Amino acid sequence: MRQNHHEFPEGFLWGGAIAANQAEGAYLADGKGLDISNGFPHGIKHDYDRELSPEKFYPTHEAIDFYHRYKEDLAMMAEMNFNVFRTSINWSRIFPNGDDAEPNEAGLRYYDDLFDEMLKLGMQPLVTLSHYETPVHLVKEYGSWRNRKLIDFFVNYAITVFERYKNKVKYWLTFNEINNMRRMPGGAGGIFIEEGEDLQQLIYQTSHHMFVANALTVKAFHEIIPDGQIGAMLSLSNVYPHTCRPEDVFETMELRRRSLMFGDVMIRGAYPSYANRIWEEEGAAVIFEEGDEALIAAHTVDFLAFSYYRTSTHEYGQPFYGDTGGDQGTPNPYLETTPWGWQIDPIGLRYTLNELYDRYQIPLFVVENGLGQIDELDENGFINDTYRIDYVREHVKSIKEALRDGVEVMGYTYWGPIDIISAGTGEMKKRYGFIYVDRDNDGNGTMERRKKASFDWYANLIKHNGNNI
Ligand code: BGP
């Protein structure tokens, strides 16, 4: 029988995670096309501008200028002893319109340099193919994932980057938080509802197209990078029943299943039996083409990556509502809450790791976990973010407990090791970083980088492979 780990195993992947669109800026540099993130003035929770307005400020256009400053930033990540760094390739740097016949060489070269730099510093790149970055042209011209042509465009993009980076990048993720198609299809898939359309039908049909694309991508990946690993990525912050009332308990399971079904398809290779009932009750009739089910069955992912930020509770009859942090219902009186209403629950991470491993029995990777807070500089310009240290320490302890429970965990990439643009709200004020960036919500500031107290603490945690807590 396999022994459970009492400590973090050797080779555990420690680091941080960002997304291209929330950090790079340089939104039209070197031939890049517009991607959907460029049209959200206040993040994906809020309005999307189909046409950019010259009067408005769009935070992703400059973001934190990681595009030009990545060497300096990665050097700081190396100082924190990262052995993995997660970012995305912005699809629209490689195929500016999404349907171009040839890839954009300047975009390819940028990621060559970026991955070379990571490798030089001892970090494995962990790369997301699509992190809320669908090219705008695909949305306007094809209706995004409504159209099965997107499957070909996406797979062609994936093959292009697999071929290009096969000797540099061994860990890949397909769609960031694919289950956010249910909560925020605009951000997750460039799906903006048109008059006369049924939202549920739209969500499940477009998700189905993404599942087919996922299967074809996994197939190509295993052919091109046989020594690598590719994962599904879901938003899996958890939700508890608000009370022990059976109606609360059962409906909470139904809510959770609406996320887990995305994992079921990509990991088990088939829609779960309860999917039919969901579609029936939502009035959705998902059209499958011949061969779709066989493809999905044949090409499943190697591991499950997920984000975990918080838990919430659900009461019977409450509408299913969520944001970038996960499902959100009624506050839990036992938990502390951030200024953004996210409730801190380290035990919930251990609960989630066990839940997922029981269900799937494949390696798990915590690729997002972090604390968005208001950080204030003291009179010396220092940020003593003990609250962030507490957050990470308690969550890492929970992972250690899950290892003892027998869960296989590959790694931990803290979300936003450097302050970046919030995906949900477009703010800079919601800071996650161990590194402070001098920039505010309106784009003022010098962009100077500065270490917070958590910087040395996290460096020391990794130095001891997490076994000093
Ligand atoms: C996830 C996204 C990230 C991210 C994070 C935190 O949903 O994958 O892109 O930003 O949530 O959310 P926010 O930025 O809204 O605080």
Image (cartoon, helix red, strand yellow):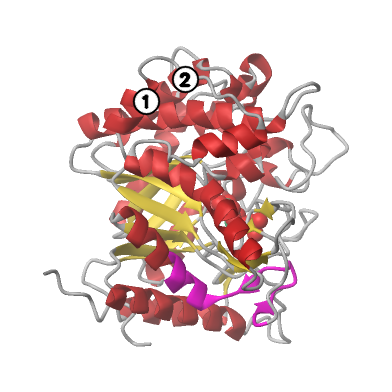
Quick one: which residue is furthest to the right in this view? 55
- From the top left corner, tell me how far across and down residue 178 is, in percent: 52, 42
Q: Crowding near pointer 2: few (<14 within 10 Å), some, many (20+)? A: few
Q: Which mark is residue 293?
A: 1
Question: Seen in the image, is 390 located left or right of residue 161?
Answer: right
- Callout 2 touching callout 1 (CB < 8 Å): yes
Q: Which mark is residue 288?
A: 2
168 lies above or below 397: above
447 lies above or below 39: below
Magenta highlight range: 334-352
- From the top left corner, tell me how far across and down residue 105 is, in percent: 43, 25
Report the front residue among 48 and 254.
Answer: 254
Report the front residue among 266 and 337.
Answer: 266
Q: In the rendered image, which quarter contains the N terminus?
A: bottom left
Q: Is residue 348 magenta?
A: yes
Q: Is residue 369 magenta?
A: no
Q: Quadrant of ligand 1?
A: bottom right
Q: Which mark is residue 354?
A: none
Q: Which residue does the image show at 56% across and 75% down from the upper left?
A: 345
- From the top left corner, tell me how far across and down residue 446 is, in percent: 70, 60
- From the top left corner, tell me how far across and down residue 179 is, in percent: 54, 44
SS category of the residue bearing label 1? helix
- Can residue 20 be seen here? The reply is yes
Three-letter amino acid code of the residue under disc 1: Glu
Q: Which residue does the image show at 27% across and 30% down from the upper left?
A: 298
